[in-house]
Amino acid sequence: MDRRGFLKGVAGGGALGAMPLAALAQLDEAGGGGVRAVMLVAQAELPQALAIASGLSTELGVRPVAAGVRELGSFAGVTALLERAGRGRVVGVMDDASALIFQQIAAARGAGLVMDTYRRVEATSLVAFAINT
C-alpha cells in the first residue's frame, strides 16, 4: 500500500476525521461489537464546531448538544454535561481551551480519553475528542 497516497486520502477526508471518530465513538471496548451510548457536545459560539458536530451527528445518529463557553469553562457546567452523558461516551468539538478544561474535569471524575485531534478551520483552532465516562 502506498502510505503517502493513503495519508493524503485520510487527511483530505474531513476537517476532523469525522468518519474514524464517529466509528470509534460507538465501539464498545468489551469486544463483542456492542454499541455505546454517545453524547455529542459542540461549542455553541463557534459555527465551525457546530457544522462539524452536525456532520458527526448524522454519522452517529444522535443530536448534538450545543454548550456555551460559560458552561464549558466551569466545573459545574462540565459536570452537568458528564452526568447527562451517563456511562456512555462523550464526543466533543470545541476550541482548545474549552477542550482542555472539559478533558481535565472528566479525567478528575475517572473518565478516560479515547482520542483527540487538533485542526485549524479558517482562523479557529478546534479540538475533537472522545471520552469514556
Image (spheres, helix red, strand yellow):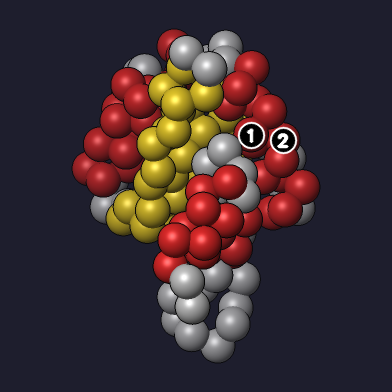
Mark yes or no: residue 129 visible: yes
Against 55, residue 120 (above or below) is: above
Image location (x, y in percent) of residue 126: 45, 27
Is 40 displayed left or right of 125 in the figure? right
Residue with the mark numbered 1:
52
Name which residue lies at 39% across and 36% down: 118
Mark yes or no: residue 83 visible: no
**Crowd band around label 2 with a 10 angstrom C-alpha radius: few (<14), some (14–19), many (20+):** some
Image location (x, y in percent) of residue 26: 59, 64
* Disc number for residue 31: none
- Marks 2/1: CA–CA distance: 5 Å
Q: Residue 125 versus residue 42: which sits nearer the camera?
A: 125
Q: Residue 13 versus residue 93: which sits nearer the camera?
A: 13
Residue with the mark numbered 2:
54
Is 132 displayed left or right of 91 in the figure? left
Image location (x, y in percent) of residue 50: 65, 26
Image location (x, y in percent) of residue 23: 59, 63
Name which residue lies at 69% across and 54% down: 60
Name which residue lies at 38% across and 53% down: 115
Circle 1 sits in a helix, a strand or a loop, which is it? helix
Task: Verify CB contact (< 8 Å) between mark 2 and mark 1.
Answer: yes
Against 77, residue 24 (above or below) is: below
Q: Amino acid at mark 1?
A: Ile
Q: Residue 93 versus residue 118: which sits nearer the camera?
A: 118
Q: Amino acid at mark 2?
A: Ser
Looking at the rendering, which quadrant does residue 117 occupy?
Answer: top left
Circle 2 sits in a helix, a strand or a loop, which is it? helix
**Crowd band around label 1 with a 10 angstrom C-alpha radius: few (<14), some (14–19), many (20+):** many
